[in-house]
Amino acid sequence: MIRFEQVHKRYPGGHEALAGVSFELGAGEFAFLTGHSGAGKSSLLRLILLLEHASSGQVLINGRNLGRLHRSQIPHYRRNLGVVLQNHHLLLDRSVYDNVALPLLVSGYRPRDIGRRVRAALDKVGLLTRAGNRPLELSSGEQQRVGIARAVVHTPRILLADEPTGNLDPELSAEIMQLFSAFSDIGVTVLVATHDIGLVGALGKRRLRLSNGRLAAADEEVAVA
């Protein structure tokens, strides 16, 4: 589903964010992306999102070489991706339902399909009864769940998360990770960038560890603590 082949990413001025990165994640696989600040985690995610392009090497998603996608194909490609951020950027003057529905409205889904998908997504994250609430009426953990529902409302094949538990306590962080694990169980490929090594170890999922732009342990299985 996600395949990197000797990927390099260099920025103007000569900084090399990624150097010869190669790995592969299959459908339904759940992996953590770890490394120090500046190790290249965000650059790697941005390549998958096509916010940037590799300087050399190949990034393949579901067998498609991203370097060969025409600009006009990028919006359709991104419909296969869901993204969860640490700061979920919810619209505070809109209901939970409206926040989750937003990407479907932008993509031109029919109203009937929007309602069905939004209710299903909220049900998956345990917030169906809070659909009419505003974000500020929810806890931090519930707000992050809204962000997850918004990321999966269009049933993406790949779910990317960048420090999704950075503002949450350990108990809430564990709950969010269990949600991600549940999505991988139904075939969604999940890649989570995080600094929380304790959380990584507790879940025992595959770990991709970046160090100065290089993949230090592409196939390391993290032992359960």
Image (cartoon, helix red, strand yellow):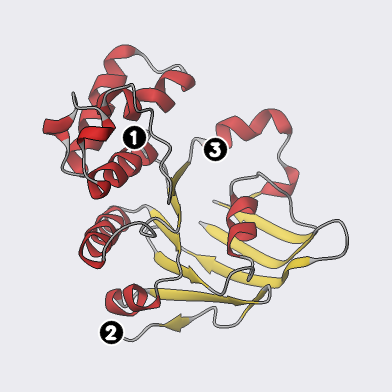
Q: Position of residue 224 (x, y in %)?
A: 28, 84
Q: Check disc 3 and report the residue beneath it.
A: 78
Mark 2: secondary structure? loop
Q: Position of residue 169 (x, y in %)?
A: 26, 63
Checking the image for residue 224, the label placed there is: 2
Query: Looking at the rendering, which quadrant does residue 216 occupy?
Result: bottom right
From the viewer's perspective, tell me whether residue 104 is left or right of residue 74: left
**Type of amino acid at the residue the image marks with label 3:** Arg
The crowding category of the residue bearing disc 1, from other C-alpha atoms within 10 Å (few below 14, some 14 to 19, many at least 20), is many
Q: Residue at image x 66%, y 44%?
A: 51
Mark 3: secondary structure? helix
Q: Residue furthest right?
A: 13
Q: Check disc 1 and report the residue beneath it.
A: 153
Q: What is the spatial separation of the Cα atoms under label 3 and label 1, in whole angstroms? A: 13 Å
**Type of amino acid at the residue the image marks with label 1:** Val
From the viewer's perspective, tell me whether residue 176 is left or right of residue 6: left
Q: What is the spatial separation of the Cα atoms under label 1 and label 2, in whole angstroms? A: 31 Å
Mark 3 vs 1, N-terminal side: 3
Q: Depth check: give the residue in front, 69 or 50.
A: 50
**Type of amino acid at the residue the image marks with label 2:** Val
Q: What is the spatial separation of the Cα atoms under label 3 and label 2, in whole angstroms? A: 34 Å
* Residue 174 to residue 78: above or below: below
Mark 1: secondary structure? loop
* Residue 109 to residue 60: above or below: above
* Residue 143 to residue 203: above or below: above
* Residue 48 to residue 128: above or below: below
